[in-house]
Each structure stands twice: as structure tokens, then as C-alpha cells.
Image (tube, rainbow, N blue to C red):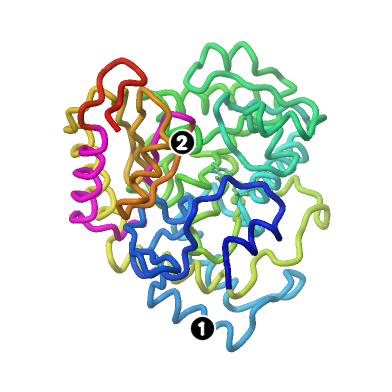
Amino acid sequence: MDIQQIEDTGLVRMYAKRDIALVRGEGARLWDSDGRQYHDFASNYGVNILGHADPEVTRAITEQAGRLLSCHQSFYNDARAAYVERLREKLPAELGRVFFSNSGAECVEAALKFARAATGRTHVLAARRGYHGRTYGALSATADKKYREPYAPLVPDFAHVAFGSLEELEAAITRDTAAVILEPVQGEAGVHLASPGYLEGVRELTRTHGSLLILDEVQTGFRTGKLFAWEHTGAAPDLLCLSKGIANGVPMGVTIVSEEVSEKLPPGTHGNTFGGAPLACAAALAVLDEIERRDLLSQSASTGAYLLERLRGLNAGGIRDVRGLGLMVAVELRERATKYLRALQERGFIALPGGATTIRFLPPLVIEREAVDTLVDTLGELLAGTREKAGTAAE
Ligand SMILES: Cc1ncc(COP(=O)(O)O)c(C=O)c1O
């Protein structure tokens, strides 16, 4: 079977393809169809938080698949109830109600609809460089013209302000603002952290104006050394969006809302077929159990700090910036990142772009320090000789 030829001729051409076919994974390693092994510093865009083929997730899925795969939410289900109970233990008392869907965009979509319905307002403020997904609501909150323009017109009443500027937000927020939606750390844009006090300031402004705060933790969830990135700040949201890593690769989206928001939602007005499926809930429960049992949050916080420290120690003029939180880390270069991503892949490391000039690392929480060391050494070799001026990389 010619995997590449079949996909190239059979699929809608929507993704810039890499020239390997990944066929197997174990822990933080992946193998391609030629048997070549890779260190996984991408975890499928932040999804495989426990790594690949985790035995406990596999056991939970297998067991559940033998009993009941799906169960519409008009029926009660034991696996779903067990997960909701466990997830709520991890949340502050104010965030008490869970809505299930199947992806990041879908859980953002629910949050936006809920914010409008709960406030009776229509305006939404989001951040420039932010990324929230590709369905119409999520895309309207996403700023990037490249994604927006071919599909215009988008949902009305969305506007964008600079991430990090409380002044801009204060000037834009009004009594018509239903919600402000932000990523606590902007992932797709290249791992941009909020400056200290920013999220707390946003929290205050939204309260003052009677607007809701939606935090999109689709990428940051479980990855920054805490379960939720907002826990690094004092800014708990009214609506919280989770997806990607929460079920280690089984599609799942979760929108968590306060009791107050939940009370204002007209029953029966939003829903989906697959959300809250027992299969996804069983996987998600195993993820929470494993994170706790193996103390993966503190382990990932220290591995992330080590990765940051090692990258900052690279003495290459071609590096403009190194930043990160937990295992969400980026190296911004003075030139385009593509050729370095390709070179890393050729040397057995899968990493991600984060904007045109940034290499982003979202490894599984179980990544080992030896893998970090070999990655940083390899990147150091690739960047050796790069100078401070753009376009002078030695390769
Ligand atoms: C912060 C954030 N929100 C939403 C999404 C959309 O998720 P999905 O691709 O599952 O629709 C992503 C995906 O990268 C994301 O990073």
C-alpha cells in the first residue's frame, strides 16, 4: 500500500503534509512506516499527554469498548457519571457544570453560544494572534486572516484586541460585551505567555462590565505543570474550554460553566450526538487517574523547566527568544522555522511550528530528560554558526 499516494490523491488538500507516515507509538516515541523511530516533541499537536499506547488508557478503552461505546446524553451512563464526578473534584466550586462535545472548536463553540445566551448580549472580544478553532464561532474568535478570509462573512459582533494590553481591552469592552475569550498561553501563535497580572486584570474588567470570561485551555489544559493554566494566576474563568489532551487521543471536548451561567441556558437548545460518549469518558478518567498516580504534573513542570533552561543555554545567534510554561515551550528564530523542523525530523525528532519563525515543543508529560538532552544537543548543532542577522544560518 502506498500510504502517501492514497492520501495525496484521496483527501481534500488542506494540510501541509510531512513526508512520513506514522504507524505506531509507545510512550514518547513514534515509528514511521519504514521502521524509523522518532522522539515525540509534538504529541499530535498536544493531544497524547500520557504518550502513546499508555497501558492504563488502553485497558480502560478496551474494557469500555467491550461494554458500551456510545450513549446519547438523553440517557444516563455510568462511565460518564464517574468522569463528571472525578473532573468536578479538580475544579473550583464555582465551576460546577460540564457540557460534553468532541473537539476543541466544538467546546469553544458551546462556550460562545452559552455566553451569548446567558448574558443576552452579542459582542465577543478575543485576542489578536489567538487561536480557537475553525467552526464559524471559533473562527470568528480566531484573528488570523489566512483562516478567516476564504470563509467570510463570519459571525457578527466579534472584535480583537492585543493580547496583554489591559488598556486596549478597557477601551473595547462595553455593556454589550457578552464575553472575553482568551488562551492563558497563546499556543498556535508560538507560546506567548500573558504578562504577570494580565489575566487578573481581564478578570476584573469582565466583572466590572458584567461580561463573562471564557478561558480556552484546549492546548494549555494539563500541560503547564498544573491541570489548568489559570491556576498559575488568580483569574478563574466563568467558562472553561478543554479538549486535546484530556482523553489522550480519544476525541473529546468539555465546556465547563459556572452554576450561574448554567441556570440561564435554555434546556434543549444546544447539543450533539457523540459528546460524553462512555468510550471517551473512560479514557478521560484514566488520564486523570494516571496524572495523579504518577505525579505527572510536578514531573512535567520540572522537565519543562529543564527543557527551557537547556534551550536558554544554547549559544546560537539565530535564536531570538525562548519561552514556555511547563511542557509548552517555544524557540523563536530569526528566520523561518520550516527548514529546522525538517532537519529535526530527519534526525529523529518531531516538533511543531508556532507561527512562521517559531519551533514549538508540546511533548507528552512522560518525556524523559535524556530525550530532552538529545533534542537540545541536536538543535544546538543545527543552529551552530547562526548569527544575529536573519538569513545567515549555516546549512
Ligand atoms: C487554544 C485552542 N483552542 C481551540 C483549538 C481547536 O481545537 P480542534 O482542532 O480540536 O478543533 C485549538 C487547536 O489547536 C487550540 O489550540
What is the x, y in percent for residue 222? 41, 52
Beta carbon at label 2 within 8 Å of ligand 1: no
What is the x, y in percent for residue 178? 71, 30
Which tag is nearer the camera, tag 1 or tag 2?
2
Q: Residue at x 40, y 44 (%)?
A: 342
Return the residue at label 2.
Answer: 354
Observer-nearest of 352 and 250: 352
- Relative to 57, is 242 on the left or the right? right
Q: Is residue 383 above or below residue 258?
A: above
Mark 2: few/some/many CA within 10 Å (<14, 14-19, 20+): many
Observer-nearest of 252 and 357: 357
- Magenta-drawn segment: 356-383
Q: Residue at x 28, y 25 (%)?
A: 318
Return the residue at label 1.
Answer: 62
Mark 1: few/some/many CA within 10 Å (<14, 14-19, 20+): some
Q: Quadrant of residue 200?
A: top left
